Image (cartoon, rainbow, N blue to C red):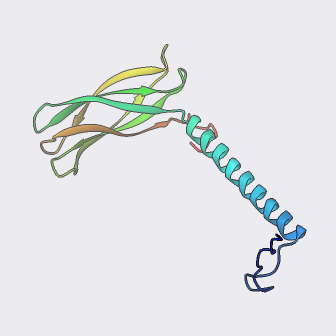
Amino acid sequence: MTTAPAPQPPAGRYGPEPTVRTGARRWVGWGVLGLVAAALLVWVAIGVTDERVTWKDVGYHVDGATSTDVTFEVTKPKGDTVACRVQALSQSFAEVGVRTVEVGPADTGTQRVTVTVPTAELAVSGTVASCDPVVPSGAPAVDGY
């Protein structure tokens, strides 16, 4: 008993016949795509781990319609000074008070700070909006700060 060869579609029906050259191009394309993806991952990882200043809200206490105490922790290099923008918010999330406080050098990398934010009306929460390194006057900015 003899077996018949498998039927082949007509030439050119599904595009040009693959050659050694088209296979090589495909592998080169996948290689370039892989390198770009790896470079992107490295770039993102460096950006995430290069975070120099972080902060965490710990709590707040509304002292009435005129002020709110906000407590937070800021983590930074021990010798650096950062300026943190602390805000008090109304029930509709409107900013009803804001204060910028500088957190200076310390023996530890993480400091707990409590600041009183004066308010124009009753606040219902207090939070840190941002903390940025302070560049000494006359010094060039480093790392985009």
Q: Is residue 112 above or below residue 125?
A: above
Measuring 25% from the left and 29% from the top, which residue is drawn there? 59
- Along the line of sight, the residue nearer the viewer: 117 or 11: 11
Q: Is residue 95 above or below residue 3?
A: above
Residue 141 makes an appearance in the image: no
Query: x%, y% of residue 111?
Result: 41, 21
Image position of 139 (left or right of 111): right
The N terminus, quarter of image:
bottom right
Query: x%, y% of residue 138?
Result: 61, 38
- Along the line of sight, the residue nearer the viewer: 12 or 53: 12
Image position of 42 (left or right of 72): right
Image position of 97 (left or right of 109): left
Residue 119 makes an appearance in the image: yes
Looking at this rendering, what residue extends furthest in the front direction?
1
Image position of 52 (left or right of 100): right
The C terminus, quarter of image:
top right
Looking at this rendering, what residue extends furthest in the right direction?
20
Measuring 65% from the left and 50% from the top, which residue is drawn there? 40
Image quadrant in which you'd find residue 68: top left
Query: x%, y% of residue 64?
Result: 10, 34
Label total for image: 0
Query: x%, y% of residue 75?
Result: 46, 26
